Image (tube, rainbow, N blue to C red):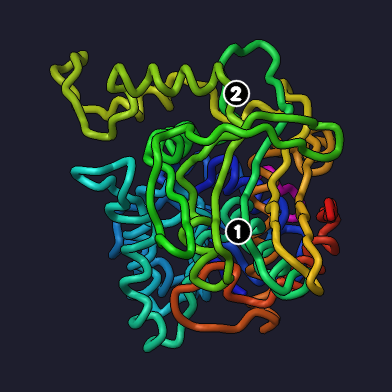
Amino acid sequence: MRVLLIGAGGVGTAITRIAARREFLTHMVVADYDPARAEAAVASLGGRGDRFSALRLDASDRDAVSRVLTEQNCDVLLNATDPRFVMPLFRAALDAGAHYVDMAMSLSAPHPERPYEECGVKLGDEQFALAGQWEEGGRLALVGMGVEPGLSDVFARYAADELFDEIEEIGVRDGANLTVEGYDFAPSFSIWTTIEECLNPPVIYEEDRGWFTSAPFSEPEVFDFPEGIGPVECVNVEHEEVLLIPRWVEARRVTFKYGLGDDFIAKLKTLHELGLDSTAKVAVPGEDGPVRVSPRDVVAACLPDPATLGDRMTGKTCAGTWVKGTKDGAPREVYLYHVVDNQWSMREYGSQAVVWQTAINPVVALELLSTGAWNATGVLGPEALPPRPFLDLLTEYGSPWGLRDGS
């Protein structure tokens, strides 16, 4: 399999380190707007890097991306960029007749009059609108194939197939006890993406109502995470699973809640109140006259790169899917989860826990596509495909998952 990976940040670099250990990969072209980042990702592989090459590529340039896919004879485009680049990359893969995999979906837009009650443009709407073209072309666009969304969706499908007869609620729950020495505020994942998902109206799904929204950080609950992480307060956040799971899994209610903490929430609210979460460019003074920049991009530039925090980080991160329903007429409640210890991921791969946990899942998916264990066309989420091959291969990669049965 020949893959064009676009984005050589923390997640993209972790993808190369994981994929370099697997035989299914024939070649991976690592592309980034900053060629030094792409070259550094390949160089860090050392003797394992003979199947990798680096080049400069602008993710917003649909024609250029399509041309590289064709020239490099790539089977798949793997998108490891911010969600703002989803649509040009998605369309470029369609133009070139390549398969497509991403870890986040096309952006949402709040309802213009009732943002905290009704959905406007939902996450992924732009991609699903083109599903027919992907089916006609005989190609697969596998969307939301990170850890959350991604592995969390695989867990939902597995629960529906093997653990439950009827499902009352599926709730993705994310929590960690990670700390970063020397920083009062150092997000472990892209702040651009974090702002997007945390400050947009969260989406909830209910069988009788369909999709609807609530206020950011609503419905706080304390969830007890496994493997020593313990109780963490989680709140509603906009996330792709709520838009994906109900399309293929029957459940009366679907939610996503994230363990952010009061201090993190307060800082996000302050950014919003100051307008620093905006993506609209504003004019600021520069050495050669006014320069137009996005406030959100400035915030991202002022914070440490999450990929560089691993040496200062301690603790574990947990992604998982809580499911409540019935099996054989009896109530059942389970939490399917995946925990990564930062000390382990740094020692084994040189990548901090959060980016590594995100990165492993698209690599597993690529291997399943290369062997034919996953074989489909159209625009699909992970829960549309058989879960057992994925979970078995994830364990083979040396990263097992867990199940806590609370029945």
Secondary structure type for disc 1: loop
Report the residue at 71% width, 72% height from top: 387
Secondary structure type for disc 2: loop
CA separation in Å, label 1 and label 2:
24 Å
- Toward which corner of the image does residue 289 lie, by quadrant? top left
Q: Describe residue 393's horizontal placement relative to residue 174 as left or right.
A: right
- Image location of residue 25, percent across then percent down: 68, 69
Nearer to us in this view, 225 or 401: 225
Q: Which residue is mark 1?
A: 150
Confirm or deny contact between disc 1 and disc 2 (CB under 8 A).
Answer: no
User: Which mark is nearer the camera, 1 or 2?
Assistant: 2
Q: Is residue 39 above or below residue 229?
A: below
Q: Describe residue 55's horizontal placement relative to residue 336 as left or right.
A: left
- Image location of residue 191, percent across then percent down: 47, 31
Q: In the displayed image of the protein, which residue is found farthest to the front?
A: 329
Q: Is residue 348 above or below residue 270?
A: below
Q: Describe residue 151's horizontal placement relative to residue 245 as left or right.
A: right
Examine the rendering and report whether any part of residue 32 can be seen: no
- Toward which corner of the image does residue 342 lie, by quadrant? top right
Q: Amino acid at mark 1?
A: Gly
Report the residue at 66% width, 47% height from top: 14
- Image location of residue 62, percent across then percent down: 30, 62
Q: Quadrant of the C terminus?
A: bottom right
Q: Residues within 10 Å of mark 1 (few under 14, many from 20)?
A: many
Q: What span is colored magenta in the figure?
A: 43-48
Q: Amino acid at mark 2?
A: Gly
Instruction: Say which label, 1 or 2, has the lower sequence index.
Output: 1
Q: Which residue is mark 2?
A: 261
Report the residue at 40% width, 45% height from top: 33
Nearer to us in this view, 255 or 327: 327
